[in-house]
Each structure stands twice: as structure tokens, then as C-alpha cells.
Image (tube, coloured by chain):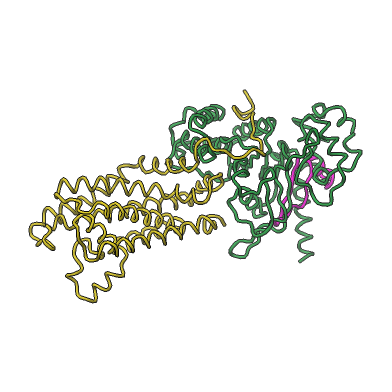
Chain colours: A yellow, B green
Amino acid sequence: MSIIAGHDGLADPAAPYVEERRGLLWLCEREIVRFLKLWMQTLVAPVVSSLLFIIVFGLALGDRIAGIGGIPYKQFIVPGLVVQAVLTAAFSNNASTVMQARMDRFINDVLSSPLRWWEVNIGLAIGGLVRGLLTGLILLVVAVVLTGVGVAQPLVLVTATVLVLIAFAQAGVITGIYANSWDAMAFITQLVILPLSFLGGTFYSISRLPDAWQAVSHANPIFYLVQAYRIGFLGHGDVPAWVALLVLAGLAAGMSAWAAWLFRTGHRLKP
Amino acid sequence: MRERRHGLAQLGPSLQRGEVTTGPIPLYMRSSPAAAYSVRGSARRARAAAVAPLAVTVPDTVPASGGVRRPLALAVRSFTKTYADGFTAVEDLDLEVPDGAFLGLLGPNGAGKTTLIGAVCNLVRPTAGRIEVFGHRHDTREARRLVGLAEQDINLDRFLNVDEVLVYHAGFFGMGRARARRRAAELMDVFDLSAKAKVRPGALSGGMRRRLLFARALMHEPRLLILDEPTAGVDVELRAELWEYTRRLHGGGTTVLLTTHYLEEAEALCEEIALIRGGRIIARDSAAGLRAKYGAADIAEVYLRAMSEAALSGEVAA
């Protein structure tokens, strides 16, 4: 037997580091492969969950609920449910993946490699980003078929989707870096994101709320996500499109900056 | 002087005649006589080293044949690590490992071995000091691609199968797909994992997981291989296999840094042994040199004496 097959030609330490294929592409591929292996849990389950809301509240009860602003209720709730599914998929995928990688310490395989800090950040974020996108696309197709909802402003919808995916994919990575238990993860998803989503106007227009509650709703970042999607799908919302997109852009930039700082400094990743 | 794989006959007549000991010897060779063995089959290189002027500071390069100086595989200078809770795991540590050497790092739990290894592998942020791998700062891409690490813990991605664990690891080190697959197949063959290529780590036996860790560390053909207690918790048979793999790697030119709690393992494998306690290197020599220094019958006795002496001096200093 040879020394260790193929190990005879050790690299010249003085030679520059050249990649045959970018390590970043490999990391992106690994993160996508991981969630695709669990497609039932990562894609089918969230789509079914959102569909149940559309079927129960939109199709079964929708006829008994008056339309909002002239829009049938079954169509009115679609944007909020789609964005909720997209952000939850992007967030939970990355939060659980990164936390698992830290707990099981296989993140060391990446941190000790020649990958640059920003490549690690992008690579670990991409899984949630793609999962969120696929979830949104599947849900969009099914919702169009079931409710007949259209896309009034595609550019707003695409821009909002990109910003939501960036913001929550990065938020997931950040949470995965800070969380030390599944309880902490559940706290964020079940007691922060989910309530904010429901209070963000998914099922109602805030114009129907008292003034004080309207003001409170404006402090909820997810409200702007729902509004951006509602403008994208239905053509109008409770705030102008540029306001919703500006808040989304700020959220995406803030989360990206926070994640970048964590990877650049190694804070909580490297003792 | 006790010889194992590198018998004196392999080192050339001039070295056998003791010529390398006639001139001033660089500090790295004085502190580590066995390092001369890593000057593989090159008495000329050994002579070049022998006539080099005595360095006041430790050189960062090793004289190579033809007078060309090549960098040390690992050069750690004044490395200190104090964790966030204020615990100083390693303090002002200097360590150098010449290219091609096989160094064992022995010490009790909490001595700083894993902290040192973590820092070398860019997994621990040094509080102070400088670490270089083959002349490159340890956190550069050029350094990273030269280091392979098999950690003490079984840290495998539970969602990937054996083949994927290996291929993706190679990918992180910039390998193309075809070469990564070929290399993974080779290593699965060498480590008897081919039949388990599509099996996830959770379904592997403990021994197979340990072999997979070993194979993963070798995927990118590292020039410096760091093994952090690679045989912890493995049976005698697998331990013997891993020893054999390690010997073959070293024979092929790989520099090996091994930490272990098994004294006989260090003695059997390593050209040199460094004893570490309280974040400091307290002794470093060949096994024979250590036995002579401490007047001990075996390395276990050396270990106990060195540690008790260090503990005593620590108490006196305190």
C-alpha cells in the first residue's frame, strides 16, 4: 500500500493558494443539500402549514368575512401568509443549522479552512435564503391556483423578497451563533417572530385598528414586510411601497452588518 | 540514542560519524536533537545546519539542502491565551516544529494542548503572540490550506454521509469536484470506509467515525497534520491501525503534531516529546533524551517527575 494513497505530493508551502473550485461554492452547495435531504420537513411542512391557513380562513371562512378594500378576504391574506412562510423558512433553517454546527463542533471544519470570513457568512446564510425562496415560490403557485390572487407590482414583490431573504437569513445565522439551546431558538421563533407576524397585519388592515394600535403596529418591523408583499400582490397597502422597502432595506443592512461583524471578529465563534 | 523508523543507517555516514555535532548547533536543534532526523537522508543539509552560527533568537527557517532556508512547519512565539472568564490557558509559550518532524505534546487535562492546537488551526483567537505555519501567518489562506486537523471530539456533520463529509471538506480547501471525489475514494479505501460511503456518521461505529475524522483531516493533503488525542476511546486494534497510518504519513514527509494522554503512544510514534503543563512547555527532547535527563526508566516516570517538578516550582514561585 502506498504511504496514504495520493498523499505523496505534498504542497509547496511557498506556492500561492489557488482554488480549483471556489470553497464558497462548496459551502453553498452543502447548505442547500442539507435542507433538500430533509425536504419533507423543510419544504413540504411549511407550505402545508400556510396552505391550511389559506384553506381555513380564506376558502372555508372567507365567504363569511367581508372583503377589505374591495379585495376578497381569501386573496387579502395571501401576501402576509407567503411572507411569513418565507421569513420563517429563511430564519429557522439558518438558526438551527448554525447552532447545530456549533454544538456538534463541525463548524470547525469550515472555520479552520482557507475560506474567508465573508465567504463563511454567505455560505452559511445561503441555505436559508434558498429554502425561503423555494417555499415562497411553491406557496405562490399554489395560492394563485387556489385563490386567483395576482401579482400587481412584480418589481416591488421581487425587491421585497430579496430584502426579506437577506434580512432573515442573516438573522437566522446571528441567532444560531448566539443561541446555546433549542429552547432559546424556540423562544425567538415562537415568542418573537410568530406573534410579530400575526400582529403585523397578516389577517387584517391596520386602518381598522384604533389610532394607538396603529402606532404600535408601525413599530413592528414585520408589518412593513407584510405591507411590501401586499403592495406587490394586490397593488396597495397601509403604507407607501417606498416606505416599506426602505424599512426592509434597513433591516437587511443591519442584520448583514451584525453577521459580518460576528464572522470578521470571530465573536462567539472562536473563543 | 533510541531509533525507530529512522534508523541511523538512513541518515548517512557523516551523521553516523557524529559530524553534525561538531559545530555550533542552531537552537531548534539543540533543544530538539531528534529534529535532525527530520532532515531526511540529507547529511549535507545537516552539515549546513551544523555550521550555521548560533542564533540568539530561534530561527523561523530551517536550513535545507543547497543552502536554501525553508520555513519551520510551525513557529509559535510568545503565545498567550486568556479566555473571556479570565482563565489563562497558555502563557507566553514558544514552540517550533521543523518541517518533517513528528512532535508529541504531552500534558494533563487543562495543560493548554487543545488551546494551542485551536489557535494554530484558527479556531481560538490568541490574546498575544504570533503563530506561523510554514512561514505564513496562521490565519492566512496560505497557512490554512497546509494544516490538517483531526480533533479529539467526533465533530461530523450528522446530515452528510461519509462520502459527502470528505468531498465537502476537500471543497472548502479549494479542490475541484473530480479530484475531491477521487481523493475521497482513495481515502475511504485506505481507511476501510468504502462500504459505508453512503452512510451517515450517526450510523457508524465509534472506530469508523474516528477513521473518518482521520480521513477528513487528510483530504486536502496537509503538510502539517495535527492530531488531538486521535486514539482516545478507541480499541487496541484500531489504535494500532491509526499508529500505522500516522507512521506512513510521516514517512511520506508530513509533519505531525500529536497530543495524547497515552504515554506509550507518544514514545512509540514521536521523534520528540514536549511536556506541557499550566500552559508552558516544561521539557522537550527525544524519549531517550527525556529519560536520560530525568534519570527515568520509562516515559511514564519521566512524565510524573517532570510534572511534579513543575508543580513544585509553580508552588515555590507562587
Residue furthest to the bottom = A212
Give the mark count. 0
Residue furthest to the left = A64
Please, is residue B191 above or below residue B172 in the view?
above
Q: Is residue A186 left or right of residue A210?
A: right
Q: Is residue B154 left or right of residue A63?
A: right
Res A25 → quadrant? top left
Q: x, y percentage for residue B113? A: 66, 50
Please, is residue A50 above or below residue B196 in the view?
below
Give the residue displayed 89% in from the left and 38% down from the top. B21
Q: Quadrant of the N terminus of chain B?
A: top right
Compare residues A192 and B139 and report the one nearer the observer. Answer: B139
Q: x, y percentage for residue A92? A: 36, 53
Q: x, y percentage for residue B220? A: 57, 36
Give the residue displayed 29% in from the left and 60% down from the top. A225
Residue furthest to the top = A1
Compare residues B240 and A88 and report the one nearer the observer. Answer: A88
Res B53 → quadrant? top right
Q: Is residue A166 left or right of residue B165?
A: left
Please, is residue B258 above or below residue A67 in the view?
above
Q: x, y percentage for residue A105? A: 51, 49
What's the magenta region? B272-296
Any magenta on residue B279?
A: yes
Compare residues B146 and B205 and report the one nearer the observer. Answer: B146
Res A237 → quadrant? bottom left
Any magenta on residue B271?
A: no
